[in-house]
Image: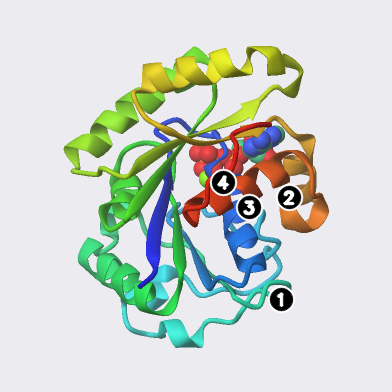
Amino acid sequence: MGEAIAVLSGKGGTGKTSITAALATALAKEGKRVLCVDCDVGLRNLDIPLGLSDTAALSFVDICEGGYSLDQLTAHPQFETLYFLTAPMNRSAEEIDADAFGGMVLSAREKFDYIFLDAPAGVDAGFRLAAAKADRVLLVTGSDPAAVRDAGRTGQVLELMGKENVRLIVNRINPKLVSNMALTVDDVMDNAGLPLIGIVPEDPNVTLAAAFGKPLLTYTKKGAAAACRRIATRLQGMPVKIEL
Ligand SMILES: Nc1ncnc2c1ncn2[C@@H]1O[C@H](COP(=O)(O)OP(=O)(O)OP(=O)(O)O)[C@@H](O)[C@H]1O
Ligand SMILES: [Mg+2]
């Protein structure tokens, strides 16, 4: 039985989509069967860091409404065990049938080892869609005070939803401030009140890879790519030191 992982943050632009793509490709590289679902209804963009922006893709509504089945998805051209469902453009998150979406996630757990649900910013319908049926939540935050406060609030929303398996990813840590890193990360964990699963450095390759239409992990092995590979290893239950 596979595991559904929601990648969330209340605040916009923390790196949810970039990290979703990097974790998914890291796991697919290891032969895991992975499905990535873009839950950012109306503002989809997970196709870009997956290197799929020029490729036609079914949307999750095509599956939820029964027009297509999960068996009809086409594998990623570079990762043969990686599959993708985009978000619909022609409706709002409120119009999505949450039960049908939940049913799709449940049946995906029978076919895939990992299902990543890339949530939109905010704690509204799209956030709830992604979080509702997730077995595990990765809350992506920056280390600045506004992002940390927001991560704390988002953690409380998840607690009210009954979500227990919530882990923090602190993104965009400045590698030049490595001496302060332990302090920064401790502060973030204390303030957000959540345990950590990984840290990711500020790395221009994240934006460059997307601009060149390449998945980060095929563009570079260092920096944010290496950090995401380590998080992917932890997701599989193997301990790896937390470092930049
Ligand atoms: N570790 C990083 N180093 C440098 N740039 C990064 C890093 N992570 C993300 N970015 C950049 O930050 C921007 C926002 O990233 P991304 O789209 O992944 O965030 P998001 O949380 O999904 O945003 P939204 O809330 O709009 O969905 C992008 O330009 C991306 O390239
Ligand atoms: Mg996003």
- Of residue 241 and residue 123, the one placed in the foreground of this image is 241
What is the number of the mark on residue 22?
A: 3
Image quarter in which the N terminus is found: bottom left
Which amino acid does the dot numbered 2 rest on?
A: Ala
Mark 3 or 1: the one toward you: 3
3D distance between C-alphas at marks 4 and 2: 20 Å
Which amino acid does the dot numbered 1 rest on?
A: Pro
Q: Which residue is mark 4?
A: 231
Choose top left, top right, bottom left or bottom right for residue 182.
top right
In the shown orientation, is residue 80 left or right of residue 188?
right
Residue depicted at x 39% and y 27%: 151
Residue depicted at x 29% and y 61%: 96
Which amino acid does the dot numbered 4 rest on?
A: Ile
* First in residue order: circle 3 vs circle 2: 3
Q: Is mark 1 within 8 Å of ligand 1?
A: no
Mark 3 or 2: the one toward you: 3
In the shown orientation, is residue 36 left or right of residue 201?
left
Q: Residues within 10 Å of mark 2 (few under 14, many from 20)?
A: some
Query: Answer yes or no: do the residues labelled 3 and 4 have beta carbons within 8 Å?
Result: no
Label 1: state its secondary structure. loop
Q: Is mark 2 within 8 Å of ligand 1?
A: yes
Query: Answer yes or no: do the residues labelled 3 and 2 have beta carbons within 8 Å?
Result: no
Q: Which residue is mark 2?
A: 210
- Of residue 41 and residue 190, the one placed in the foreground of this image is 190
Residue depicted at x 24% and y 64%: 97
* First in residue order: circle 3 vs circle 1: 3
Q: Position of residue 2 (x, y in %)?
A: 39, 69
3D distance between C-alphas at marks 1 and 4: 24 Å
Q: Which residue is mark 1?
A: 77
Which amino acid does the dot numbered 3 rest on?
A: Ala
